[in-house]
Image (cartoon, grey):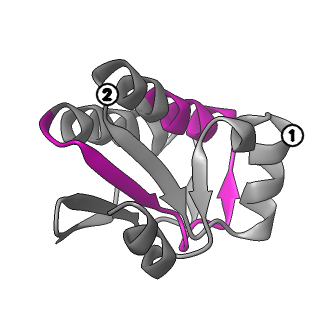
Amino acid sequence: MKYQLKESNDITVLCLEEERLDTNVAPDLKAQLLMLIDARKKVLLNLESVQYADSSGLGAILLGYRQARDLGARFAVCGMQKRVYSLFSIAQLDSRITIYKDEKESLQQMK
């Protein structure tokens, strides 16, 4: 999985640098999210490079959300392309997981 980690104050940003969030990427994303959320209180997943996601990709994001919820951490997603957001909406994850338009807005709101 290609990704980049950034720190902004007390927020860790995981920028996924993959066009597809599918069964090839989801297991690595799950592992990375679990590790980050266990170690930090605020994690932002930037999906602006992702053009396609399937159910395994959504499962990885949902696992991150649940881990954060259970540990009292904050988890959010930003930069979703229209196609990916549509899948989120169909799965009704947009009512559970905080979604921001872009990284700049996310960092301001998650302070």
Disc 2 crowd rating (10 Å Cα; few below 14, some 14-19, many 20+) is: few
On the question of residue 78 being in view, the answer is: yes
- Residue 14: quadrant of the picture: bottom left
Cα distance between the residues tagged 2 and 1:
26 Å
Name the spot of residue 106 as percent of width and height, x first.
Answer: 46, 68
Which tag is nearer the camera, tag 2 or tag 1? 2
Is 57 displayed left or right of 8 in the figure? right
Name the spot of residue 28 as percent of width and height, x first.
Answer: 34, 40
Please report the bounds of the magenta region as a residue range: 39-63
Name the spot of residue 101 as percent of width and height, x first.
Answer: 62, 72
Q: Is residue 25 above or below residue 66?
A: below
Name the spot of residue 53 as percent of width and height, x first.
Answer: 67, 50
Q: Secondary structure at mark 2?
A: loop
Query: Do tag 2 and tag 1 residues touch (Cβ < 8 Å)?
Result: no
Q: Is residue 59 above or below residue 83?
A: above
Disc 1 crowd rating (10 Å Cα; few below 14, some 14-19, many 20+) is: few
Residue furthest top as drawn: 70
Q: Secondary structure at mark 1?
A: helix
Is 54 displayed left or right of 102 in the figure? right
- Residue 108: quadrant of the picture: bottom left
Task: Look at the image and tell me in which quarter the C terminus lies.
Answer: bottom left
| Residue of label 1 | 90
- Asked whether 23 or 9 is in front, the reply is 9
Task: Look at the image and tell me in which quarter the N terminus lies.
Answer: bottom left
Q: Is residue 14 magenta?
A: no
What amino acid is at disc 1? Answer: Ile
